[in-house]
Image (cartoon, coloured by chain):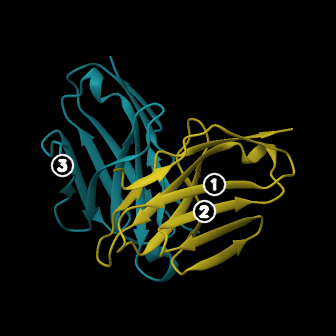
Chain colours: A yellow, B cyan
Amino acid sequence: QKEVEQNSGPLSVPEGAIASLNCTYSDRGSQSFFWYRQYSGKSPELIMFIYSNGDKEDGRFTAQLNKASQYVSLLIRDSQPSDSATYLCAVKGSWGNEKLTFGTGTRLTIIP
Amino acid sequence: GAVVSQHPSWVICKSGTSVKIECRSLDFQATTMFWYRQFPKQSLMLMATSNEGSKATYEQGVEKDKFLINHASLTLSTLTVTSAHPEDSSFYICSARGLAGGLAETQYFGPGTRLLVL
């Protein structure tokens, strides 16, 4: 079983709609959860992180965390063509473990 | 804030040569830097974790004598690929974690270095 799982996609969403990206993780002791965006040929850039159950909003982005179910999601409202990229979910383990474990990413395409 | 640079962005070298890649945190001090490698259409794979002033910790399967890491200051870490071979061709990305607050929680990535070994 992979430690961090994401649907590889591609996920196609019409412009202006809500894109929903999901991620599950296996380590119940995980403390922090991150969403990165990676454009083709570029390095990842941080969108946001979350460590408490519930929702966290930042502009058009909302991260949702449910530790009991071991999943974290990212919602992108009013999707724009510039949001087309691969979205990487990353999980930081127990306290003192600084490493991030990445999922394989979900490729998102916003259709104009 | 939280800008990380890498140099060079591209390097092409002959098989058997060594290549050094620099990673700098430009506007914050990084206690810990991480080195990743990414092959086409694959996710990031952590190679090693380096803390300022101490030896790097390598992930299983990563040869420490081939991938030399030096973290000499709170703003600079280097990765040297020794005796590079074509199978070392990849996208090498560093990240840095800051000292305190939000910067300590998050890894910020450099722009990456593409290595092509002929």
Q: Secondary structure at mark 1?
A: strand
Residue at 19 percent of width and 22 percent of height:
B16
Q: Quadrant of residue A74?
A: bottom right
What kind of element bears circle 2? Answer: strand
Q: Which mark is residue B60?
A: 3
Residue name at image x 52 percent, y 65 percent: A71
Residue sitting at x 38%, y 32%:
B90
| Residue type of the residue flagged with mark 1 | Leu
Q: Nearer the viewer, residue B106 or A83?
A: A83
Image location of residue B32, percent across then percent down: 33, 67
Inspect the image, locate mark 3, and give the three-letter code of the amino acid beneath it: Gln
Residue A78 x/y as whole percent: 84, 56
Lateral position of residue B109 relative to residue A56, left or right? left
Callouts 2 and 3 in the same chain = no
Which kind of residue does numbered mark 2 sit on? Ser
Question: CA–CA distance between discs 3 and 1?
Answer: 30 Å
Q: Is residue A25 above or below residue A58?
A: above
- Quarter occupied by the C terminus of chain A: top right
> Which chain is disc 1 placed on?
A
The image's mark for residue A21 is 1
What chain does mark 2 sit on?
A
Which mark's residue is nearer the viewer, 3 or 1?
A: 1
Rendered position, B108 above or below B114 = below
